[in-house]
Image (cartoon, grey):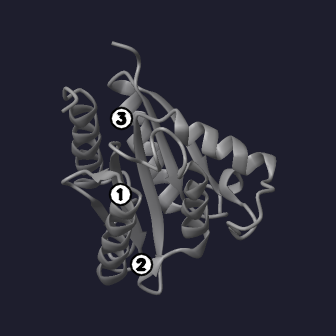
């Protein structure tokens, strides 16, 4: 079997934001289990507002879409801004529209893990729900386990403290399991 390629998309423009750290942790787990990984965060997804009527794309956006085309599994991570997915991550996901005429349209048939971070449970859970809905709209298959991370209220780093690493590991295992199922 060829090496699976897991691609994570999300974060903020702040380097090593909690969302980016959660994505990095998930990708590290995927690497330990044998996947090749790519992180697309921060400057990697800082594109002009998506305009479907304008076919001109920055080189970075074309590169981003090409990497997504090579993915066997995707992990999407967003901070919860006022109870919703960030505009920054949503804009990056809007560029997936450039895959609408591909043989594999959007994320059709791909397993997609969803990770939401926020300063409180309400925003984390609401953001996770939105990521799952967007995954469905992009024809992806959200993993049964989605990860909502409350970044305040506990001791230490919530990305490194139990139960988050174990939950990220379970989500990554679900991505691998889906990738290894025979095609219908």
State the residue at coordinates (55%, 48%).
101
Task: Tell me residue 9's x, y (percent).
Answer: 52, 52
Camera-side residue of 167 and 3: 3
Left or right of 63 in this view: 172: left
Query: Judging from the image, what secondary structure is the residue with disc 1 in?
Result: strand
Query: Judging from the image, what secondary structure is the residue with disc 3 in?
Result: helix
Instruction: Report how far apart the C-alphas of labels 3 and 2 lie in the structure.
Output: 25 Å
Left or right of 102 in this view: 34: left
- Mark 1 vs 3, N-terminal side: 3
Task: Tell me residue 81's x, y (percent).
Answer: 50, 80
Q: Which residue extends farthest bottom?
A: 82
Q: Pointer 2: what residue?
A: 119
- Look at the picture and state if 102 lies above or below 142: above
Left or right of 86 in this view: 110: left
Q: Pointer 3: what residue?
A: 29
Q: Nearer the viewer, mark 1 or mark 2?
A: 1
């Amino acid at each position: 079997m060829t090496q699976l390629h897991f691609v994570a998309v999300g974060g903020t423009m702040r380097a090593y934001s909690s969302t980016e750290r959660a994505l990095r942790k998930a990708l590290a787990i995927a690497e330990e289990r044998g996947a090749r990984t790519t992180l697309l965060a921060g400057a990697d997804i800082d594109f002009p507002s998506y305009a479907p009527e304008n076919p001109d794309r920055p080189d970075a956006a074309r590169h981003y879409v090409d990497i997504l085309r090579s993915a066997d599994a995707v992990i999407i991570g967003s901070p919860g801004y006022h109870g919703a997915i960030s505009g920054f991550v949503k804009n990056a996901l809007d560029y997936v529209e450039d895959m609408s005429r591909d043989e594999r349209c959007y994320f059709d048939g791909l397993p997609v893990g969803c990770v939401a971070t926020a300063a409180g449970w309400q925003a984390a859970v609401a953001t996770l729900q939105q990521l799952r809905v967007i995954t469905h709209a992009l024809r992806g298959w959200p993993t049964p386990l989605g990860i909502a991370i409350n970044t305040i209220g506990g001791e230490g780093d919530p990305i490194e403290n139990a139960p988050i690493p174990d939950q990220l590991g379970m989500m990554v295992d679900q991505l691998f399991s889906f990738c290894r199922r025979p095609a219908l």
